[in-house]
Amino acid sequence: WSRSRSLWWLRKHIPCGSPQPRNWSGWEVNGSAARSVGEKLSKVATDKVAEKLSSTLSWVKNTVSYTVSQMASQVASPSASLHTTSSSTTLSTPALSPSSPVELSPDDVELLAKLEEQNRLLEIDSKSLRSVNGSRRNSGSSLVSSSSASSNLSHHQEEDSWLLWGRIVNEWEEVYKKKEKQIKELVRKGIPHHFRAIVWQLLCNAQNMPIKDQYCDLLKMTSPCEKLIRRDIARTYPEHDFFKEKDSLGQEVLFNVMKAYSLVDREVGYCQGSAFIVGLLLMQMPEEEAFCVFVKLMQDYRLRELFKPSMAELGLCMYQFECMIQEQLPELYVHFQAQSFHTSMYASSWFLTIFLTSFPLPIATRIFDIFMSEGLEIVFRAGLAVLQMNQTELMQLDMEGMLQHFQKVIPHQFDGGPDKLIQAAYQVKYNAKKKK
């Protein structure tokens, strides 16, 4: 057992950084496997190897025992409170003996082979535990600080998510009928990007709409809203690569979908703000499919009522949202009233564009996932959650200051990810019966 071989073993089996606490999310993990490995290694280390390889194998015994004991303690006590930084921590291990390698008997070679096998099993067990932890952890749980462990967790989660959503899509009718609640929970955690187009179509039942066959014919017609649509297209996602260039493919297909809808629904025609919703759909799917999904959203998700020329439904939403503020945030409600800060001044765009003009696209897209599954309820919930998080700051501002806060501060509060906002949204009290 050479010195270089020993150093290689050290780098492979001693983790960088102190052990991290594991969040097992209520799952009971049996630590007997790890303890059994420790007992076998202890027995091995006291055998004949102690005579001929006293220095080297003594070191191996100590370091492996340390690794096993740490894993056993983590498995047996997953709630232990351990804290560490992401930087490396030097572990104290017995010094290596500089003595030259010793000739080994066949028995010793066999014994070392058994030791290597136990090490391999221990490593496999560690990876399997990380896999369970990664696939079962809640979306808000913190990751292990070690970069390699984080990579493993992310990889396992991505694999689990792809397999799960693939099965759901392939067996949609049966799965959704039996497990609608579980699917809603999955949607709240985020739909994988490559499944988003088909899942959105399935959620709103737009995948086989007859109107899709009329799309090409609609594009050959002339709409009275064409000039208005052309004017607004340049202001729709002006910084997004797909739409920012004049006469680009993105602008052209956006114009096509908006024009086609204005011909299908002449009462609504075109309403400013709806292009942001269509633009998001076009980022995920071809224009014919985006057109069908938009028609479904307008018909079945209250959007058509919001975009009617009278906008009576938008006024109703503003009233309902204001009542929620009065009931759940009474002090903030009084402050808004004192400053003549009306709900429509900050919340109308939340409802008309489903936060697409209020938050960065990755955040708004996650909210839109939930909107496709649960409708406008998520706008009420997320909106009130935003106010709860900002109540202290808003109470100290006048009307102009509050407008600036909504425009400049709030959009960047969730740059780290939408999980915090979504979790807070589902802590909000929401009574669907009161909204009817």
Image (cartoon, rainbow, N blue to C red):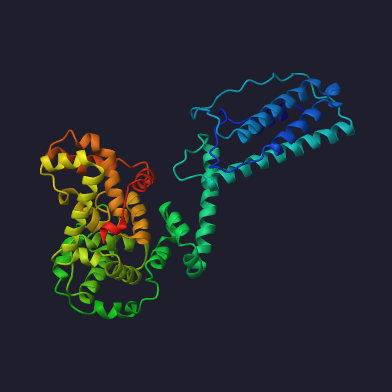
In the displayed structure image, the side of residue 310 where residue 373 appears, left or right: right
Image quadrant in which you'd find residue 314: bottom left
The image shows residue 382 at horizontal and vertical percentages of: 30, 49
Q: Residue at x 85, y 27 (%)?
A: 47
**Residue 242 seen in the current view:** no
Image quadrant in which you'd find residue 34: top right
Quadrant containing the N terminus is: top right
The image shows residue 130 at horizontal and vertical percentages of: 59, 42
Quadrant containing the C terminus is: bottom left
Q: Residue at x 21, y 50 (%)?
A: 323
The image shows residue 392 at horizontal and vertical percentages of: 24, 34
In the displayed structure image, the side of residue 79 where residue 277 appears, left or right: left
Q: Residue furthest right?
A: 106
Q: Quick one: 78 or 10, which is closer to the camera?
A: 78
> Compared to 167, does 366 lie above or below?
above
**Residue 23 seen in the current view:** yes
Image quadrant in which you'd find residue 148: top right
Q: Residue at x 21, y 66 (%)?
A: 305
The image shows residue 152 at horizontal and vertical percentages of: 55, 43
Number of marks:
0
